[in-house]
Image (cartoon, rainbow, N blue to C red):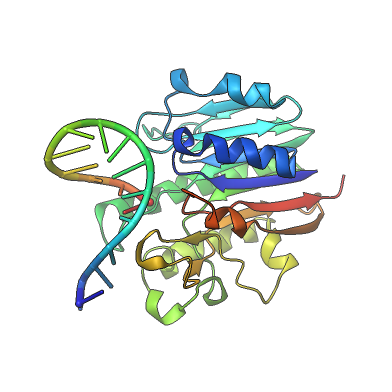
Amino acid sequence: MKIVSWNVNSLNVRLPHVLDYLKTHAPDVLALQETKTPDEKFPQAEIEAAAYHVVFSGQKTYNGVALLSKTEAVDVQAGIPEFEDAQRRVLAATINGVRIIDVYIPNGQEVGSEKYEYKLGWLKAFSGYLKAELVTHEKLLVLGDFNIAPADIDIHDPSRWQGKIMCSDTERQYFFAMLAMGLADSLRSLHPSEGMHSWWDYRLNAFQRNWGIRIDHILTTAALIPLAGGVHREERGRERPSDHAPVWVELQT
DNA sequence: ATGGTTGTACGACAA
């Protein structure tokens, strides 16, 4: 079972890239973030024409998540239960017997800002939700844009980013707390000593200079065995790319 | 150089 996470930064702009990706890689599940598309304008027909099922939770201009899958998604749930949030950032569903949680964690803008406080409050609520979900789902996978680089190896130039957004101790603690719940960082486990960067800023030619950061993750419970995984960084080098590359894992079935 | 680019939507904000 091949599972992919990709922050597309506008599905309207990136639909051709996504359809090409489905053809080339034929993933069983493709989780999207930052679709920036309200539900009434979601390109459902185009995706179904590519022989994929799709569920989505979106809004105008910002955020938005979607799950594309070869087999139908069931028990679909949008958002974090009992957490009021106007921003569409979470979509959970069961696909092939695996509980899949697609997440777009807030960026936080700058350490100490109002948006950073929103990020921390959001992480607290999401962590509680995750802990509860793990009680009832043995096969569970959390994937998406976490906007957290867990360790120095995940950053092209750690000194330049120290203490900054995505790298602050408090954010990292939330990430490690998720691992302590019984989730494995599948890409890091498969590739212990490579950068595996997944995001490159649009500015300053960051991709060409390989100024990347690993902020897109796929976490798996012990009942799921990752056989292989990686980053499709060639997508970042295409015409009019997203600033994120897809990250993927192949699970033992 | 505390720099710049992209998306949304047409000015400013988010990333």
Query: In the drawing, does residue A173 fall left or right of residue A111?
Result: right
The answer to which image quadrant residue A116 occupies is: bottom left
User: Depth check: A21 or A169 in front?
Assistant: A21
The percent position of residue A189, horizontal first and vertical second, equals 72, 66
- Residue A152 at x, y percent in the picture: 52, 76
Q: Quadrant of the N terminus of chain A?
A: top right
Find the residue positioned furthest to the bottom: A159
Q: Is residue A171 above or below residue A52?
A: below
Q: Tell me where residue A26 appears, x and y as whole percent.
A: 75, 40
State left or right for residue A240 relative to residue A18: left
Q: Residue furthest right?
A: A253
* In-image side of A38 versus A251 (left or right): left
Q: Is A196 above or below relative to A58? A: below
Please provide percent x and percent y for residue A138.
77, 43
Check the image and name the residue furthest to the front. Answer: A239
Image quadrant of residue A203?
A: bottom left
Question: What residue do we see at 48% from left, 68% from top?
Answer: A208
Q: Is residue A216 visible?
A: yes
Residue at figure coordinates x 76%, y 45% from the top left: A2
**Residue nearer the viewer, A249 or A84:** A249
Tally of numbered discs = 0
Q: Is residue A16 above or below residue A43?
A: below
Q: Quadrant of the C terminus of chain A?
A: top right
Q: Residue at x 50, y 39 (%)?
A: A14
Left or right placement of residue A85 versus residue A243 in this view = left
For the residue pair A54 and A15, the one nearer the viewer reads as A15
Whether residue A129 is visible, yes or no, is no
**Which residue is pictured at 68% across the width and 27% down the height?**
A50
